[in-house]
């Protein structure tokens, strides 16, 4: 209560709670556990169940059309529903009832079974390529109207005996947007955790922060909550997944993840505008050439 009483835009806070929930999921024999604060959000929390069949094709959405730049579909399947999605508000002055920021935690499964069979998520070099390829379509020129520095703060984390890749994507003001903009660039970011589940499946845990200016205190309170949650994440691989992991290690004993990475130097579009349906244009037309998707193999 004291945090809320003395909160401000220079000292934002989350709602106080003494109760955190431990969520446990069965992902086709893999056991995933995480402990989270209760949802603080205007909409009810989704309940998608606790057991998921990762080998059911209907569980995923697959990209089959060329991307917005005309490059062939990348064919990676992304789970239709999040394993979980939980949201929290940040607050400023107690005199201001409206929230000033939002943090979301979610879990998504990626299926690569429709890609080339030579790719293996337990191969560190190949998973790293899949991740950079995924960033291109998540935060890079392959998707959306925003621009990001990504990956930022790349590091490897050992969580209860499982190795995870961690990095961040930070939104910035694009060069073509010359005039000052009310959008809060500098305090919108995503912190990512990723690890293999099976040879053709990997897990994404994004923490999506939508903050407020001034950026430093907003980013600080968001990061504090993320760093409190991360140590609670525990993944226990199924016997079959462990077998696949050990087999891959034996075949590739000298291959490891990068210890660090610089942000990708991608070229984004020059600008975008609303399309003219009379001319057969799409809703949004991007102008200027972008970097092509990164090579997977």
Image (cartoon, helix red, strand yellow):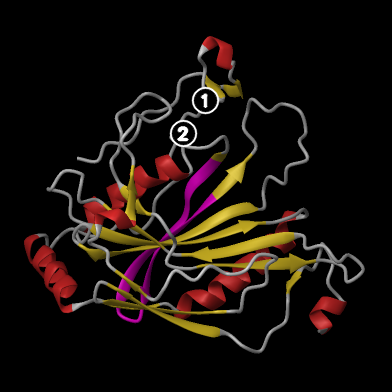
Query: What residue is pinned by disc 2?
Result: 141
**Local crowd size for mark 1, using a 10 Å CA cut-off: few (<14), some (14–19), many (≥20):** many
In the image, taking residue 269 as reference, residue 99 lies left or right, namely right
Query: Which residue is nearer to you in this view: 18 or 188?
Result: 18
The residues colored magenta run 148-169
Q: Position of residue 55 (x, y in %)?
A: 22, 61
Query: Which quadrant is the N terminus positioned in?
Result: bottom right
Q: Secondary structure at mark 1?
A: loop
Q: Closer to the N terminus: mark 1 or mark 2? A: 2
Eyeballing the image, is 121 above or below 229? above
Name the residue nearer the viewer: 223 or 203.
203
- Are the residues at dot 1 and dot 2 in contact (C-beta closer than 8 Å)? yes
Whether residue 91 is in magenta: the answer is no
- Mark 2 element type: loop
Q: CA distance from mark 1 to mark 2?
A: 7 Å
Q: Which residue is mark 1?
A: 269
Could you tell me residue 53's position as x and y percent?
A: 27, 67
């Amino acid at each position: 209560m004291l945090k809320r009483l003395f909160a401000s835009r220079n000292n934002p806070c989350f709602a106080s709670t003494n109760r955190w929930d431990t969520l446990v999921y069965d992902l086709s024999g893999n056991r995933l556990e995480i402990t989270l604060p209760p949802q603080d959000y205007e909409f009810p929390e989704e309940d998608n169940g606790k057991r998921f069949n990762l080998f059911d094709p209907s569980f995923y959405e697959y990209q089959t059309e060329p991307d917005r730049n005309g490059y062939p579909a990348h064919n990676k399947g992304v789970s239709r529903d999040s394993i979980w999605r939980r949201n929290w508000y940040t607050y400023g002055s107690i005199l201001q009832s409206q929230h000033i920021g939002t943090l979301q935690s979610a879990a998504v499964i990626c299926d690569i079974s429709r890609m080339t069979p030579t790719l293996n998520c337990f191969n560190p070099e190949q998973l790293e390529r899949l991740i950079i390829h995924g960033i291109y379509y998540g935060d890079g020129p392959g998707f959306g109207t925003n621009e990001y520095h990504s990956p930022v703060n790349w590091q490897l984390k050992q969580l209860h005996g499982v190795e995870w890749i961690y990095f961040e994507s930070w939104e910035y003001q694009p060069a073509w947007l010359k005039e000052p903009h009310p959008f809060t660039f500098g305090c919108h970011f995503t912190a990512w955790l990723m690890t293999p589940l099976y040879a053709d499946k990997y897990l994404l845990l994004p923490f999506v922060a939508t903050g407020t200016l001034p950026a430093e205190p907003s980013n600080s309170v968001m990061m504090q909550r993320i760093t409190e949650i991360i140590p609670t994440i525990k993944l226990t691989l199924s016997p079959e997944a462990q077998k696949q992991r050990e087999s891959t290690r034996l075949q590739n004993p000298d291959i490891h993840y990068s210890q660090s990475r610089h942000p990708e130097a991608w070229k984004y579009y020059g600008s975008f505008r609303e399309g003219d349906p009379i001319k057969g244009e799409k809703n949004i037309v991007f102008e200027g050439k972008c970097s092509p998707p990164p090579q997977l193999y």
